[in-house]
């Protein structure tokens, strides 16, 4: 893949290069920060060019909350249309999103990194480029099956998992910015949600509309509300959530490099 779009959030706040880049034979030759103008607003991107055996590879990095400077946009206020159009205008061959999620499934404990296989969005908030005409887009398989297959093998290797370890989960989209109640998490589990977050499916829908293959690498950063072992009344704290997610970037970097290669 020549040009990979990477979208980070709580699970990847900034694109700080890891040692895996050098180990993979990739040499950074250019690093630019640019602002892309779209019909939906301006989007700051970091564009990184690498050399590998005389051929170039590029990462186009987007912080979905745009929190490189100033305040951090809350999840319900993110301009997803501007973000995804900026990635399209940058010529990305595919997009890998990195997400921090609250774990509901017992086999997805904090610290584990998995993949989104499906999503459930009952928020009632539209996420589309088509406001003025009826355009219906199929999302039976919202994530690239081909890329998910590649990343599944990468995550098994980097985390030492056997072939029977589950890595595919259903993401439940919560409206935010509040965390969920215990009762809401119980209901979400009953309806098929394995993990909960506040952003990613809105990106996946837009990526499907503009026909860019999209995958989501999900870091289990905490047990969802009411699921903390030994303390079902434990409060959730954003700082703790983001801190946990950013200690599990090794498998994420392995996924990124696998797609670049």
Image (tube, rainbow, N blue to C red):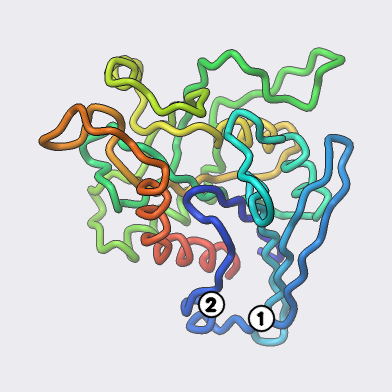
Rendered image quadrant of residue 144 = top right
Residue displayed at 61% across by 31% down = 202
Residue displayed at 52% across by 21% down = 121
Residue displayed at 55% across by 39% down = 143
Q: Is residue 148 left or right of residue 1?
A: left
Can residue 154 be seen?
Answer: no
Percent of width and height locating residue 177: 51, 29
Percent of width and height locating residue 115: 42, 45
Percent of width and height locating residue 137: 69, 23
Rendered image quadrant of residue 102 = top left
Examine the rendered structure and indicate whether residue 90 appears above or below residue 128: below
Q: Is residue 142 left or right of residue 242?
A: right
Residue displayed at 51% across by 50% down = 98
Q: SS class of the residue under badge 2?
A: helix
Point out the image quarter for the N terminus: bottom right
Work out whether residue 107 or residue 230 is closer to the camera in this orientation and state it. Answer: 230
Q: Earlier in the sequence, mark 1 or mark 2?
A: 2
For disc 1, the marked residue is 28
Q: CA distance from mark 1 to mark 2?
A: 9 Å
Point out the image quarter for the C terminus: bottom right
For disc 2, the marked residue is 21
Residue lying at the far left of the rendered structure: 230
Q: Are the residues tagged 1 and 2 within 8 Å (C-beta)?
A: yes
> Which label is found at residue 254?
none
Examine the rendered structure and indicate whether residue 153 appears above or below residue 204: below
**How crowded is the residue under tag 1: few (<14 C-alpha within 10 Å), some, or many (20+)?**
some
């Amino acid at each position: 893949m020549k040009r990979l779009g990477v979208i980070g959030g709580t699970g990847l706040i900034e694109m700080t290069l890891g040692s895996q880049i050098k180990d993979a034979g990739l040499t950074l030759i250019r690093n630019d920060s640019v602002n892309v103008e779209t019909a939906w607003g301006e989007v700051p991107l970091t564009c990184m060019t690498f050399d590998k055996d005389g051929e170039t590879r590029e990462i186009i990095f987007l912080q979905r909350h745009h929190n490189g400077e100033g305040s951090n946009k809350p999840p319900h206020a993110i301009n997803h249309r501007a973000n995804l159009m900026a990635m399209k205008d940058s010529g990305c061959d595919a997009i890998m999103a990195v997400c921090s999620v609250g774990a509901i499934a017992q086999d997805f404990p904090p610290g584990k990194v998995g993949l989104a296989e499906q999503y459930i969005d009952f928020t009632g908030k539209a996420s589309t480029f088509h406001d003025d005409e009826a355009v219906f887009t199929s999302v039976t398989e919202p994530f690239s099956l081909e890329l998910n297959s590649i990343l599944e093998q990468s995550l098994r290797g980097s985390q030492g998992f056997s072939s029977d370890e589950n890595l595919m989960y259903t993401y439940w989209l919560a409206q935010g910015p509040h965390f969920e109640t215990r009762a809401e998490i119980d209901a979400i589990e009953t309806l098929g949600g394995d993990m909960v977050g506040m952003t990613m499916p809105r990106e996946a829908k837009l990526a499907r509309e503009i026909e860019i293959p999209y995958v989501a690498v999900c870091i289990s950063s905490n047990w969802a509300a009411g699921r903390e072992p030994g303390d079902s009344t434990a409060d959730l704290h954003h700082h703790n959530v983001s801190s946990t997610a950013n200690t599990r970037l090794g498998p994420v970097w392995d996924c990124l490099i696998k797609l670049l290669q």
